Image: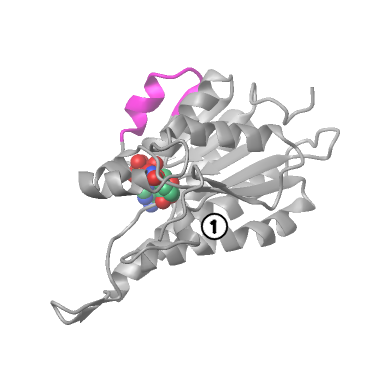
Amino acid sequence: MSQFTALKGLVSLVTGGASGLGRATVERFSKLGSRVILCDLPSSEGQQVASKLDNCVYLPANITSEDEVKEMLKTVLKDYNSLNVLVNCAGIGVARKTYNIHKNLPHPLEEFERVLQVNVMGTFNVVRQAAVLMAQNQPNEDNARGVVINTSSVAAFDGQMGQVAYSASKAAIAGMTLPLARDLGEFGIRVCTICPGVFDTPLLAALPKKAIDALTNSVVFPKRLGNPDEFAQMCQTIVENPYLNGETIRLDGALRMV
Ligand SMILES: NC(=O)c1ccc[n+]([C@@H]2O[C@H](COP(=O)([O-])OP(=O)(O)OC[C@H]3O[C@@H](n4cnc5c(N)ncnc54)[C@H](O)[C@@H]3O)[C@@H](O)[C@H]2O)c1
């Protein structure tokens, strides 16, 4: 069996791994025998999550920091000697309209910048530094060295009112997919992006019940929120299918937000 047709034994790094979609990915990958590095903010529950799993360690880092990501990857290289899979789940959202007529205020620029900073710059920061490690791997018989999976959102295409910053950031992540795949293909690194619909995670639980019910109702089938493990299953599929590359995949039960 070639190096990337099974997760067993691979070294996987999951950002945002302490919660929601990232946590489900960490859990599934650990069960499948991958050696997992859970990266999340120092304030997260990363340590508690990692300590319950086999072959999982928590390395705190803010993905927007060049130095923190560099240090974290230095530890990965020292302790594991390689990195095969990167799943970028760390991300934030904000609900704010471009213009608030009641307060006569435009969208604060710093809030827009913060969402772009974490979701776009943070994701890219980890990819570009992880690529340095992956490019050093011994290639398998298919010349493959690594897999990168980024997390966008259906909001990249069907952004709703109040999602201008979030949608812009998620569209940027989708837009990076092909150029990243082209840049990194020569090193045997594949890059895919997942666009989740509405998944049952702490990020979504922060919404009022009425909003969650409305979102659930707009899913075609199955008419329910996505289970975070279904996201993790898609990550597994991307790792295991060596011909998936440069693709942005909606995972949304045919949800189209209007
Ligand atoms: N839940 C959904 O329905 C849904 C839908 C579409 C897209 N997404 C995307 O999926 C990703 C995961 O979402 P989730 O629902 O699991 O959210 P979540 O809030 O449960 O988890 C996000 C994790 O990212 C971490 N994080 C945030 N900023 C960070 C930073 N600067 N450095 C390191 N870690 C950081 C948080 O601490 C948290 O543990 C996000 O990018 C989100 O936009 C989620």
Residue drawn at 70 percent across, 46 percent down: 190
- Outermost residue toward the right in this view: 141
Residue position for label 1: 124
Quarter assignment of residue 16? top left
The reply, left or right, for residue 118 in relation to residue 138 is: left
Compare residues 209 and 31 and report the one nearer the observer.
Answer: 209
Quarter assignment of residue 107? bottom left
- The answer to whether any part of residue 221 appears in the image is yes
Measured along the vertical axis of the image, is residue 179 above or below residue 194?
A: below
Ligand 1 lies under 8 Å from the Cβ of mark 1: no
- Outermost residue toward the left in this view: 103
- The kind of secondary structure element at disc 1 is helix
Amino acid type, callout 1 = Phe
Is 53 one of the magenta-colored residues? yes
Residue 228: image x %, image y %?
43, 34
Q: How many marks?
A: 1
Label 1 packing within 10 angstroms: few (<14), some (14-19), many (20+): many
Task: State the colouring used for the structure image.
Answer: one colour
Is 87 one of the magenta-colored residues? no
Residue 48: image x %, image y %?
32, 26
Which quarter of the rendered picture does the C terminus lie within? bottom left
Which contiguous range is marked in magenta?
45-57
Residue drawn at 79 percent across, 22 percent down: 1
Compare residues 15 and 31 and report the one nearer the observer.
Answer: 31
Compare residues 215 and 38 and report the one nearer the observer.
Answer: 215
Residue 88: image x %, image y %?
51, 45
